[in-house]
Amino acid sequence: MAEVNRLSLARRLDRCTVLGPGVRAVIWVQGCPLRCRGCVASETLPFEGGTEHTVTELADWLCGLPDIEGVTLSGGEPFAQAAGLAALLDRVRERRPDFGAMAYSGFRYEALRRGGPDRRALLRRLDLLVDGPYVASRRHGLRWRGSSNQRLVALTGRYAHVGTEPDTSAGVELSVEADGSLSWAGVPPAPGFREGLEERLAERGFVLRAEAGREA
């Protein structure tokens, strides 16, 4: 039976404006069964090494964040922990019914619709999906996506308008963590972003945390 009470996370962020509509929280889950060549968040691929959190803890965290539109689920592969994430969204919407939900997946929408009950349950709770694997040869500076094969699939009317807005890169954001380290979020608009950023920061004496943004 799928775990519904605990989630293994690589990272979480309380405010982000470059991974979906408006100001959002972001959850990066730990673990992905896919291995997209050139994934910018390779540290999130192994199923080992994440930090475990209860659904109750994460729901309290999300509900306590002021002035956010919703949450973006990234990774890793969110649909590898679909049961827990579906339970999390249910728990949050009991207290915040208008809470938006967006997710990334390396699987195509059509495949998720044909998937098991846990994956279909999570899909039903989403307003927006970015689907498909990252393909380095099809890299393009698109809004919230790393390659041109990936699609923005509006699953409810909440974010239907995004299809009419400019499809250009939203850029990336740098954050200073509580321990003083730097991290970043977003979809890099150009290849080699992470390597170049780490090199430039290292020259100035800064070390970038392993957790990164979203590409695969």
Image: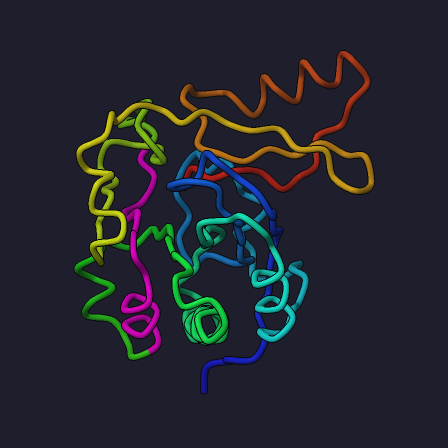
Name the residue: 29% across, 66% down.
Answer: 123
- Judging depth in this view, the residue of 90 and 36 nearest the camera is 90
Does residue 127 show up magenta in the picture? yes
Query: In which quadrant is the N terminus drawn?
Result: bottom left
Q: Quadrant of residue 200?
A: top right
Residue occupying image coordinates x 41% and y 69%: 82
Q: Horizontal and vertical percent for residue 117?
A: 29, 79
Q: Nearer the viewer, residue 20 or 148?
A: 20
Residue 33, percent from left and from top:
42, 59
Name above or below for residue 147 compared with residue 25: above
Tag count = 0
Q: Position of residue 189 (x, y in %)?
A: 40, 22
Identify the image's colour scheme: rainbow, by chain, secondary structure or one colour: rainbow
Left or right: 198 in relation to 26: right
For the magenta stretch, what is the residue range? 118-135
Quadrant location of the C terminus in the rendered image: top left
Vertical relation: 73 (above or below) 208: below
| Residue 209 on the magenta span | no
Q: Residue at x 37, y 41 (%)?
A: 21
Q: In this rendering, would 61 be left or right of 139?
A: right
Q: Residue sitting at 53 percent across and 39 percent down?
A: 16
Residue 215, horizontal then vertical, whole percent: 42, 37
